[in-house]
């Protein structure tokens, strides 16, 4: 379980809540100029990384603790709240001493329960909002576990940040969105504030707007977007940072949604149809599993192998070929029946 406060205890700005600022703090002038432009747009929280856990040691790893005084100046000059990433108890201690308003835990740190526990222990007794980015691998329990460790240390103002999951192969995205994971997180913890980081998911400026819109469509509470006054000169992640002017354009183009009116009978009727079809699907799946279990018993009685690749390939090919003209994505159908087949095999192995 998570004992957390609602989103309005985390931030008081207008929804969607926007957190913006450069990937890395590079100089006081860079931070002040970027923050002034963002404050003029109404952004309430300014973010900047000071300690940067980079993949290779020959890349810019942040300015470190000297950037804390720059963030303090941003706070004094613009009256924005300031946020930075922490990855160790030492970072926590220095950030708290400098009056940083919001902390976040990065994807690499979230993946390490020992590191998260050390941070949680360092935060014990403090009342400060903490944002937790998803781990680099698609493990929802690891993500939840990191938030639970903070919660057990007394932190109640917790938010999740969806920044996508690492990919081995090249893709459209820098990090795979796997939207079903934050959707499941929302299902388990409806009151948990969830932000989207389209900068890290996309990895390219052109993808920020469509990803941000998808997050809004999925009722995310806010966005964390990397903004730099001159992104082409950025020392880290230059390709995914945008100017404050570009952020203004993106936000102005977002289509915001309202809750469903209580009397919207058309939508309620469509949902009732969906509920009926879902029930029918469950009944059909149950019947299918009963038949595959009978097949499993037959195979066992006749000393036949459980897995028969030829039959499996035949099923997938036949179903994918029948997608033409149905409006169904063949990859979607393939994923569904791969999952069904995997469960059927697992059931037969237990017989």
Image (cartoon, helix red, strand yellow):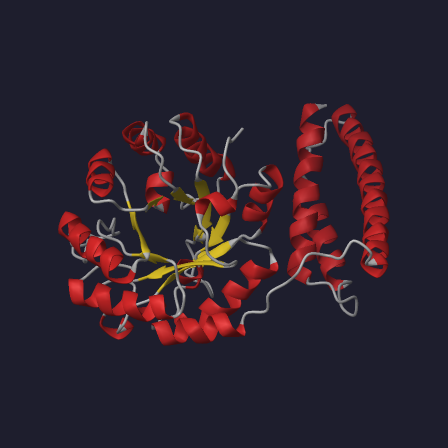
Q: Is residue 40 above or below residue 198?
A: below
Of residues 56 and 211, which is closer to you in this image?
211
Which quadrant of the structure image shows residue 290?
top right
Q: Is residue 299 above or below residue 39?
A: above
Look at the image and tell me whether residue 291 can be seen: yes
Of residues 212 and 294, which is closer to you in this image?
212
Name the spot of residue 216 as percent of width and height, x first.
56, 60
Which residue corresponds to the image point at 44% horizontal and 40% vertical from the top-left? 158
| 262 to the left or right of 116 | right
Which residue corresponds to the image point at 54% horizontal and 28% vertical from the top-left? 1
Look at the image and tell me whether residue 241 can be seen: no
Name the spot of residue 106 as percent of width and height, x first.
34, 46
| 92 to the left or right of 129 | left
Figure quadrant of the C terminus? top right
Which residue corresponds to the image point at 45% horizontal and 45% vertical from the top-left? 10
Of residues 245 and 55, which is closer to you in this image?
245
Which quadrant of the structure image shows residue 126?
top left
Residue at far left of view: 66
Name the spot of residue 242 as percent of width and height, x first.
35, 71
Name the spot of residue 187 as percent of width and height, x first.
62, 41
Of residues 52 and 309, which is closer to you in this image?
52
Q: Is residue 249 above or below residue 148?
A: below
Which residue corresponds to the image point at 20% horizontal and 44% vertical from the top-left? 98
Which quadrant of the structure image shows residue 294?
top right
């Amino acid at each position: 379980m998570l004992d957390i406060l609602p989103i309005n205890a985390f931030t008081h700005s207008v929804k969607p809540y926007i957190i913006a600022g450069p990937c890395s703090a590079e100089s006081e002038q860079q931070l002040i100029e970027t923050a002034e432009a963002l404050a003029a747009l109404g952004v309430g929280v300014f973010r900047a990384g000071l300690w940067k856990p980079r993949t290779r040691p020959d890349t810019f790893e942040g300015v470190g603790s000297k950037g804390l005084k720059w963030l303090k100046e941003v706070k004094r000059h613009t009256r924005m709240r300031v946020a930075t990433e922490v990855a160790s108890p030492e970072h926590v201690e220095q950030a708290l001493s400098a009056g940083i308003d919001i902390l976040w835990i990065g994807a690499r740190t979230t993946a390490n329960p020992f590191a998260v526990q050390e941070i949680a222990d360092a935060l014990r007794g403090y009342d400060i909002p903490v944002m937790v980015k998803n781990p680099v691998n698609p493990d929802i329990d690891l993500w939840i576990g990191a938030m639970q460790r903070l919660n057990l240390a007394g932190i109640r103002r917790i938010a999740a940040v969806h920044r996508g999951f690492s990919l081995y192969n090249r893709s459209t995205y820098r990090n795979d969105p796997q939207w079903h994971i934050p959707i499941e997180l929302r299902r388990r913890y409806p009151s948990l504030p969830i932000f989207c980081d389209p900068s890290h998911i996309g990895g390219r400026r052109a993808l920020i707007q469509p990803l941000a819109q998808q997050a809004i469509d999925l009722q995310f509470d806010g966005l964390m977007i990397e903004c730099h006054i001159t992104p082409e000169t950025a020392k880290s992640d230059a390709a995914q940072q945008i100017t404050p002017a570009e952020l203004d354009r993106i936000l102005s183009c977002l289509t915001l949604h309202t809750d469903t009116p209580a009397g919207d009978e058309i939508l309620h009727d469509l949902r009732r149809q969906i509920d009926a079809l879902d029930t029918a699907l469950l009944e059909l799946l149950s019947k299918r599993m009963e038949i595959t279990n009978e097949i499993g018993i037959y195979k066992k009685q006749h000393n036949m192998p459980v897995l028969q690749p030829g039959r499996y390939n035949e099923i997938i090919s036949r179903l994918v070929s029948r997608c033409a003209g149905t409006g169904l994505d063949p990859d979607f159908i393939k994923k569904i029946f791969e999952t069904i087949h995997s469960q059927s095999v697992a059931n037969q192995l237990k017989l």
